[in-house]
Amino acid sequence: MIRLALIGCGRNASVLAEAIGASENCELAFAIDIHEQAALNIATATHTEPYVGDLAQLLQDRSHDIDAVVINTPNDQHAQDANAAMSAGKHLLVEKPLALTSETAGRLNEQARSSNTLLMVAHTFRFMPAVRQVRRALDAGELGRPGMLRIHRWLSISTDSSSEWENDTQQSGGLAIHESIHEIDQALWLFREHPNQVHAVAAPHHIQVHLGFPSGAMAIFDVMTGLPSGEGYYALTLIGSLGSAYADDHHNMQLVYRGGRPEAFAANQHALGVNAQIEEFIAAITQQRQPSPSAPDAIAAIHIAEAANQSVLTGESVRIPADDHAHE
């Protein structure tokens, strides 16, 4: 049984804690936060031990009680928490982005290699059932060669006080680094190649990114974070040379056919994705292999998000030489 410490008990922590609790292969040993009430909320819900303070101190005092760390702190704290975990020899799962810059992320990757620790990054959309089904159709050759990927993701304005840092670009990295990195990673994962051209436009609470690939394929996606309170929306369309696939949350309603009339039921795609993500992390630890997504995958996504930011600033497309991906 792998014993996990979860640091960062605000946004997304309850979903992570529930996924850990649902697994037969790991358990939550500590809920860590600098805010006492946040740590107590997760600890009480999961019947685990709260810890108020920083990760480095806990690892100094109770390292023998922890096998791996799940980092769910604000983006600008990922690097320091990852450094603390790896310095203590702990495997880690880091919420995306791995770091605010590709340069910092590269240093963390080198630290993971030198310390022989496993480093996985939480690009959760790879694990959502609908998106995985699109990847399976691609792998089976049902869609032919991928040519066009289109993704919409629209989010409501967060009223959660623990998420206020997301509106501070110094802490979050801005929309490209914090939000559209999800779509960038999906494009890299589905196309299995890196883009050589990036163009992006942005407005308050909105960014649209265009990626051009050496094969001639393209990806276009838009992320909006300014919707009124309520449920958001996600849709993905992939067009290939032999067919197309479409994934839509439909407010998470799924149809099941068992004969007779179809039945509809609600399925939380995000929660199911987090569950699968935790299982991949634990499997990689027990099997002593690299996880997916890996640190190099995360570095590649950050590198492209940086190009998107550059395009927004200059109003021009950014060309990415193939050599720029060599270090990832």
Image: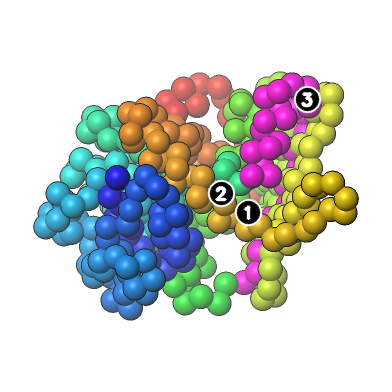
Please give the residue where the numbered disc 1 appears in the rendered image: 269
Q: Start and end of the magenta stretch?
A: 129-157
Disc assigned to residue 218: none
Kindly indicate whether the residue at mark 2 contacts the one at mark 1 (C-beta within 8 angstroms): yes
Q: Is residue 131 magenta?
A: yes
Eyeballing the image, is 68 above or below 243?
below
Q: Say which residue appears at 33% left-offset and 35% top-offset.
A: 285
Q: Say which residue appears at 36% left-offset and 66% top-offset.
A: 46
Please give the residue where the numbered disc 2 appears in the rendered image: 273
Q: Label 2 is placed on what type of residue?
A: Gly
Q: Pinpoint residue 116: horizontal percent, then vertical percent.
A: 25, 31
Residue ranking furthest to the left? 61
- Local crowd at mark 3 within 10 Å, few (<14), some, or many (≥20)? some
Eyeballing the image, is 47 above or below 270?
below
Mark 2: secondary structure = helix
Q: Pinpoint residue 109: horizontal percent, then vertical percent.
A: 34, 35
Between 294 and 110, the residue placed more toward the observer is 294
Eyeballing the image, is 200 above or below 21?
above
Q: Tell me if I can see residue 313 in this picture.
A: no
Q: CA distance from mark 2 to mark 3?
A: 23 Å
Q: Quadrant of the N terminus?
A: top left
Kindly indicate whether the residue at mark 3 contacts the one at mark 1 (C-beta within 8 angstroms): no
Q: Is residue 141 magenta?
A: yes
Q: Label 3 is placed on what type of residue?
A: Glu
Mark 3: secondary structure = loop
Eyeballing the image, is 174 above or below 163?
above
- Local crowd at mark 2 within 10 Å, few (<14), some, or many (≥20)? many
Q: Pinpoint residue 6: horizontal percent, then vertical percent.
A: 33, 58
Residue 246 sits in quarter:
top right
> Which of marks 3 and 1 precedes in the sequence?
3
> Which of marks 3 and 2 precedes in the sequence?
3
Please give the residue where the numbered disc 3 appears in the rendered image: 142
